[in-house]
Each structure stands twice: as C-alpha cells, then as structure tokens.
Amino acid sequence: MTFLITAGPTHEPIDPVRYISNRSSGKMGYAVAEATLDAGHDVILISGPVNLSPPRNTKFISVSTSDEMFEAVHRHADESDVCVLCAAVADYKAAHVSPVKIKKRSAEFSLELIPTRDILHSLGRRQDRKFLLVGFAAETDHLEANATKKLREKNCDIVVANDARIGMETDENELLILFRDGERKKISRASKTFLARELVKIFSNSQQKRLTKKM
Ligand code: CTP
C-alpha cells in the first residue's frame, strides 16, 4: 500500500521575517512514516518545517504554508491507499502579507487574519475517494466529544485523538482512536514509535476491510 502522510506545523507569513505557527514538532507524523516503511509500505511524506530528517526511501515533499500543503496533498492523494493527516496546519493566515518588514511603532497594532483551507475537510468531501482517510485531533478539553465532531464533520474513516498537552513537542503520547462505525480503541501512554506501529497496523487493516466490503 501507499501511505500519504502530512506532518509538522505550517508557517503562515506576515512579512519577510515573521510568520504565524504552532508548537508541533512533527515527531508523530515522522514516526508514522518510519513505521509505515518498516511494515513494507510506500510513503509520500508531505512535511511542514521541522527539525527532523526525513526517513530514507520516502517520496519527500517539503512545504511551508498551508496553501502549499493543500496543493501537495491534492496532487498526490489519488496515488495513495491511506491518507494520514497528522500535520498541525495553522487555522488562520494573514489577510495581507507585507512584502517588506513591518516597522515597529508606538501605537497599537492589529493583524487581520483569515481562515486557511481545511485540507482534511476537503478530502472528506470527495465522494469518489478510494483511500482511507485518517485525521488527528489534538485537544485540551472534551477530547472524545471534540474528536467525534471532527470525525463526523470532516467525513473521516478514523480520527486519532490525543491530549495536546501530552503530545506536543514530546516523545510520548496517549491515544483514543475513533472509527466511523462507532468503534473506539484506547492506547495508553507510550512512545510515539510504539504508537505509530500500532496505528499503521490499524490503518492497513481498516483499508483492507473497506476494500473487501466494496468488492
Ligand atoms: N487539518 C487540515 N487542514 C487545516 C486544519 C486542520 O487538514 N487547515 C487537519 C489536521 O491535519 C488534523 C485535523 O484536521 O488531521 C484536525 O486538526 P485540528 O487542528 O485538531 O482541528 P481543527 O479542525 O483545526 O479545529 P480546532 O483547531 O478548532 O480544534
């Protein structure tokens, strides 16, 4: 199988030296990419800016902004059997990007922000998709309720939910996996390497099941 995996944050420019971003390290996405390769599958890794080296033997696509990630995902989604969107895409970007450095002034300053495009949602809306669609949900409160809402609204097959305070910038995580048919699985705190291996097994089994159902 071929897995398309997004990882890391995005950088949304404000001017040539500043951007909006978040604390995502990319570790979970890169761990899923490693585990996918170890299981003998192919990987297309679409990554925002991170301090990690891409695993060897991946088709690696480096992006910076949410728009670049959106385009890259849509260009390659149909080559994949499983799309795993781990990236922490910025939800907003500057309405106007200044071509020159914005100078400091003593007056108050506010920035107009507009929503970015939701990549997961745009894939979920595709009626013709053949790939299994997996989203991630990093929450600080009402984990299950918020993740269930994302599963439904973004029309995913699976949502992997975690507490953002445990998972961000660390090597460990604790996961709650929600499936379209209402099934749920918990994996208690473990290394991202271990969790990634479990996830890859779950994703490839789920895609196999989808395919046999459709035959
Ligand atoms: N996602 C995406 N494109 C965006 C925002 C999010 O593809 N512009 C994907 C993420 O990769 C993840 C899922 O949507 O798989 C959920 O992301 P998250 O940031 O938890 O949720 P949001 O939809 O942004 O909602 P909120 O920030 O309100 O929790």
Image: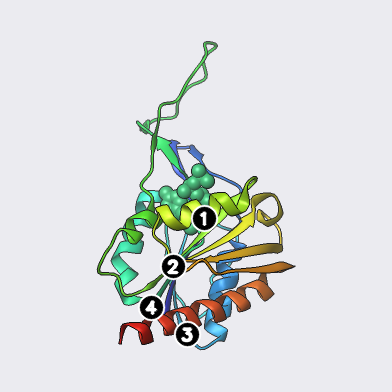
Of the residues shown, which amino acid type is indicated by label 1? Thr
Quarter of the picture containing the C terminus is bottom left
Q: Is residue 153 above or below residue 80?
A: above
N-terminal-most mark, 4 or 2:
4
Residue for badge 2: 157
The amino acid type of the residue labelled 2 equals Asp
User: Which residue lies at the image location 39% right of the left edge and 59% below the top edge?
Assistant: 155
Which residue bears the numbered disc 3?
41
Residue 203 in percent (x, y) is at 50, 76
**Around disc 1, counting alpha carbons within 10 Å, would you say few (fewer than 14), some (14 to 19), or many (20 or more)?**
many
CB contact under 8 Å: marks 4 and 2:
no
Give how far across and how far down residue 108 sits, in percent: 52, 14
* Disc marking residue 81: 4
| Chain-order first, disc 4 or disc 3 | 3
Q: CA distance from mark 1 to mark 4?
A: 23 Å
Residue 76 shows in the view: yes
Seen as rendered, the residue at the extreme left is 128
83 left or right of 7?
A: left
